[in-house]
Image (tube, rainbow, N blue to C red):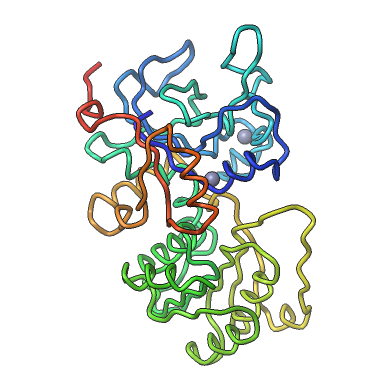
Amino acid sequence: MVATGVCRTDLSVFQGHLPSPFPIVLGHEGAGVVEEVGPGVRDLAPGDHVVCTIIAGCGMCAPCNRGEPTLCVRIAFYTGKMFDGTTRLTRGAEAIHSLSYQASFAEQAIVPEACAVKVRADAPLERLAGLACGVSTGLGASMVRTPVEPGSSAVVIGAGGVGLSVLMGARLRGATTLVAVDLSGAKLAKARAMGLATHTLQGEGAEVIEAVHDITRGGADFAFDAAGVEGTLETALESARAGGSCVAIGVSGGGRRAAIDPSLLMRQRWLTGTFGGSIAPRHHIPLFVDLYMEGRLDLDALMDSHYCLDEVGRAFEDLEANAITRGVIRFASPADEAPRRS
Ligand SMILES: [Zn+2]
Ligand SMILES: [Zn+2]
């Protein structure tokens, strides 16, 4: 591992909000260099730079063959086990589980080939870690699941790392009105500083819906709920224009219900959701890396807080306090990261 992002899902497992076996090594936004490959590995070799995607599609099932690996019937995120039901880590005789096939909060990891996406070796791996999960989720929402149209308007509820990634994708697709909504003034300031929002709204509920309808003259063409807390899906749907689209991205906590007025759907709004941005990792992650290397995707500003592995507790505290956009744990010095020839 060269670097790993710190995602809210790690924190949720740590706090017991997601069902998970213990003991477990957390971390699911790893980026690193292949040291060894096991038998049967075809497409990777020692020295390859990889981003470890959360979308470890099996490649064999019907959804995988439809090009929808995010719906793979074999992916099981919180079992802590590999596809074959075994674990790869042990402490004495005790099995240690791996979160999302990765366990990237460690200097070394054993991952399935399907989880390791080869990327160009001239890209700095510590900037790419977010492409394993959060950044790809946001980019995919506005570029893949519901491709935003040139000249359109897009609103995102929740301006954290995922929400800002939604806006980056929408801007790349040519949206000209970009509205960021959050309760945190600091997050909205970041959205403005990154040039990702033509408008920012600090607030929630009816006041936000009214303001979005004013800005967009009748409702946004595309609305995204990247917050996934009480009331935000309703706010996103009601912010979309008649015939517009609303996409659920973040869902925090089980048991929550949204109260949707069916008449909003009779006015031909689309309501859908995405897991992991609905990307096909081996296609989209290298494409996102190219966009970054061309200077069109500002991952430097997004991955804004850095820690060493011993500081993962502090990274969780900063995440919980909403003090950071995206935290990255760095393992190796840049010299260690230099590409090696196999
Ligand atoms: Zn994640
Ligand atoms: Zn599959």
Q: What is the x, y in percent for residue 132?
A: 46, 42
| Image position, residue 304 (x, y; %) | 35, 53
Counting the numbered discs, the total is 0
Instruction: Give me the residue at 25% from left, 29% from top.
Output: 337
Q: Where is residue 257 in the image (x, y as percent from the top left)?
A: 78, 64
As drawn, the residue found furthest toward the top would be 93
Residue 83 appears in the rendering: yes
Image quarter for ligand 2 equals top right
Residue 284 in view in this figure: no
- Residue 220 lies, with reference to residue 3, above or below; the image says below
Q: In this view, does 11 lie to the left or right of 2?
A: right
Q: Which is nearer the eye, 329 or 249?
A: 329
Residue situated in front as seen by the camera: 66 or 186: 186
Give the vertical position of 211 relative to 25 (above or below).
Answer: below
Residue found 46% across the figure and 63% down from its top = 166
Quarter of the rendering occupied by the C terminus: top left
Quadrant of the rendered image containing residue 161: bottom left
Looking at the rendered image, the quarter that the N terminus falls into is top left
Q: Measured along the vertical axis of the image, is residue 255 above or below residue 95?
A: below
Taking the image as shown, residue 267 lies to the left or right of residue 280, namely right
- Please give the name of the residue rendered at 77% of the width and 60% of the height, measured from the top-left corner: 256
Q: In this view, does 306 lie to the left or right of 268?
A: left
Vertical comparison of 145 with 194: above or below: above
